[in-house]
Image (tube, helix red, strand yellow):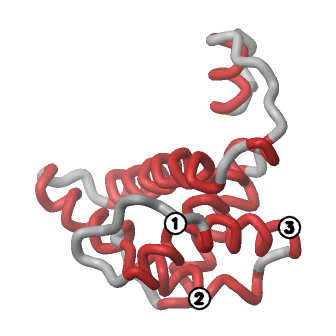
Amino acid sequence: MEENLTLLAAIREEFACKSVDLKTYSPLTLAFVGDCIYDLIVRTIVVERANTAPNTLHKRKSEVVKAAAQAAYADALLPELTEEELAVYKRGRNAHSHTTAKNASVGDYRKATGLEALYGFLYLTDRVDRLLYLVKQSFELTGTKL
């Protein structure tokens, strides 16, 4: 494995993943990946800023990954999105999921799913710079402190 590969490229190379057209992925599949990558970004920020007890880390992380917070981030980011990004977000938001968040309204849950679909799309297209920019912007636009 080459040293300078992105995480995505390294995973694809190491596990011989074949290239897939992301347009064939359902928005819920994109959200499945986006949920994970967003969680990883937030966990990394929280740990890097304060190496503390796991329970404290979990509480800090949970405040920004819950559906209500993600819905607020989505609302704040809408003017920042390109046409392509907005289309991915809307596909995710409008997807019919058979599950809902335990402590979120249906509207917030759908917006959060849209945001996660966008984050999954950006990760799977190896646009990590854009992904990190949008995550950072969402925090700045809403006054979120980690």
Secondary structure of the residue carrying tag 2 is helix
The image position of residue 117, as x and y in percent, is: 61, 59
Q: Residue at x 70, y 44 (%)?
A: 25
Looking at the rendered structure, the kind of residue marked 1 is Thr
Image side of residue 123 versus residue 69, left or right:
right
Image side of residue 59 versus residue 26, left or right:
left
Check disc 1 and report the residue beneath it.
113
Q: Give the mark, 3 or 1, whose residue is nearer the N terminus.
A: 3
Q: How many marks?
A: 3
On residue 65, the disc is: none
Secondary structure of the residue carrying tag 3 is helix
User: Separation of disc 2 and disc 1 at Cα?
Assistant: 13 Å
- Residue 98, quarter of picture: bottom left
Q: Nearer the viewer, residue 49 or 19?
A: 19
Looking at the rendered structure, the kind of residue marked 3 is Glu
Local packing at callout 3 (Cα closer than 10 Å; few below 14, some 14-19, many 20+) is few
On residue 84, the disc is: 3
Q: Give the mark, 2 or 3, whose residue is nearer the N terminus.
A: 2
Image side of residue 65 versus residue 80, left or right:
left
Q: Residue at x 60, y 89 (%)?
A: 76
User: Separation of disc 2 and disc 3 at Cα?
Assistant: 17 Å
Q: Residue at x 50, y 56 (%)?
A: 38
Q: Residue furthest right?
A: 83
